[in-house]
Image (cartoon, helix red, strand yellow):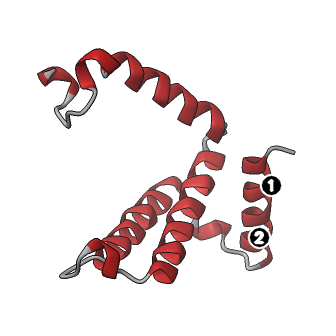
Amino acid sequence: MKESEEIIQALLKFRNERDWEQFHNPKDLALAISIESAELLELFLWKKADEANTEKIKEELADIFSFAFLLAEKYGFDVKEIVLDKIKNNGEKYPVDKAKGTAKKYDEL
């Protein structure tokens, strides 16, 4: 079993044991990702990056990943495949010879 499948199966088991699938429609999962992302950002608010609590960062990242995996599962997406496809597409938009060392958007390179 792929690691991503193992994670999804564990999430589904946890969710189903609690009868939470009724709350995990795509819209609400997307909203949850956004909310958890804001909670991650809050850990850095008014601090230097190295002052943020790393244990809390791990917790918020886990929440974000969890909801993202559940959303991918809702659509039947293979997490590994969609991430690798995105990296490939970004490689085409941001060729090394133009993008290396710059934060410019692809249409500004």
The residue under the point 52% across, 82% down is: 55
Q: Position of residue 97 (x, y in %)?
A: 28, 16
Look at the image and tell me in which quarter the C terminus lies. top left
- Eyeballing the image, is 49 above or below 73? below
Q: Earlier in the sequence, mark 2 or mark 1?
A: 1
Q: Which residue is mark 2?
A: 16
**What is the number of the mark on residue 6?**
1
Q: Residue at x 50, y 64 (%)?
A: 64
Q: Residue at x 23, y 76 (%)?
A: 48
| Above-or-below relation of 75 to 41 | above
**Amino acid type of disc 1?**
Glu
Q: Nearer the viewer, residue 96 or 3?
A: 96
In the rendered view, does 45 fall on the left or right side of 73? Answer: left
> Badge 1, how many Cα within 10 Å: few under 14, some, many 20+?
few
Distance from disc 2 to disc 1, alpha carbons, whole Å, reads 15 Å
Q: Which x, y percent locates residue 20? A: 66, 73
